[in-house]
Amino acid sequence: MRYFIVDDDTASRRMLAKIIEEDHLGLVIGEAKNGKESLPLILAIHPDIVLIDLLMPELDGIETMEQLKTQGFNGQFIMISQIVNKEMVGEAYEKGVEFFIHKPINRFEVRSILKKTAEQFQLKHSLIAIRESLAHIESSTPLKKQRSIKEIVLSLLNDMGIAGESGSKDIVAMMEFLIHQNNTSTMLPPLKELYEAAANANTSGPVNIKKESKSIEQRIRRAIIAALNNLASLGTIDYTNPKFEYYAPRFFEFQEVRLRMRELEADVDEPMKVKINIKKFLQALYLETTEKFFHG
């Protein structure tokens, strides 16, 4: 993988470059100390992934990202930030950020996220090739699949201990909606669209879409919190548990998993309110489901 780092902090740039090189995660092909300086460089050398600081002088990370996309750059973005502002994080995800790396920089988190992003990058290009190939097959010809979308999704949810949660039905409906769209993009549409799709799929008669969408959001949120608790519990018992190692870094923020693990280890009476990213969870589930659906 070819990386470009944009950060006004020299120490952060050096640390990220060192981790990438020492852990053999790819090649750093360029750096810039601010968004304005990075624009012509990124557009000229087209890196696969841009690691970009959220808060910078002149052009911040989100503004830089928008300008790059407007000018035709289609690589992936990872945001670097010590800001935990919910609105700013949400805006970054809406604009196309794949993941966040939090400051102060942690080697384990960087390694985990970059490996995960590289997997998504490869999957995206595999999906495009597969769907271009499928486009030549007549739409009326049924494709033989080893497992249905529902079976795959429930298998993944079962691994995280939430296949029996009420929100699992809504999650299955969302994955079926996304894959049947036959969209080459690996990014999700707005959550509102997904809630409405699930509402329409899970009801047979007239329904108040707005009200049902709110109910679906709450059911999914509860299911995701249950998954976080289950995985954190596995990690507390055995940090090398294969389900913990596989699902925790893909579906949740590193800090939230570690916080929940520490609470379990300390056996606190009133755990802190869990902050979850529904879109991140569904994004990871969509990528996993798509890969298994098309690759078997």
Image: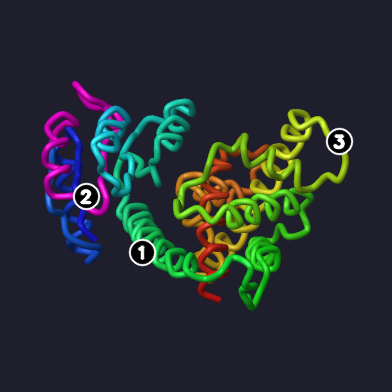
Q: Amino acid at mark 1?
A: Gln
Say which quarter of the image contains residue 96.
top left
**Residue on which the image places disc 2:** 16
- On the rendered image, what quadrant is the N terminus found in? bottom left
Secondary element under disc 2, as helix, strand or loop, is helix
Q: Disc 2 vs disc 3: Cβ atoms closer than 8 Å?
A: no
Where is residue 153 shown, x and y percent of the image? Answer: 65, 62
Residue where numbered disc 3 is placed: 206
Residue 81 x, y percent position in the rendering: 33, 35
Q: Amino acid at mark 3?
A: Pro
Magenta-span inclusion, residue 47:
yes
Within 10 angstroms of label 3, few (less than 14), some, or many (20 or more) residues? few
Front residue (pair 242, 4): 4
**Which of these two is toward me, 146 or 131?**
131
Between disc 1 and disc 2, the foreground one is 1
Nearer to us: label 2 or label 3:
3
Q: CA distance from mark 2 to mark 3?
A: 53 Å
Query: Residue 127 colored magenta?
Result: no
Name the element at disc 1. Answer: helix
Left or right: 289, with 202 as reference point: left
Q: Is residue 195 above or below residue 286?
A: above
Question: What residue did someone put label 1 on?
Answer: 122
C-alpha distance separating marks 1 and 3 = 42 Å
Label 2: few (<14), some (14–19) or many (≥20) C-alpha neighbours in 10 Å: some
Assign the C terminus to one quadrant of the image: bottom right
Which region of the structure is painted magenta?
33-61
Secondary element at tag 3:
loop
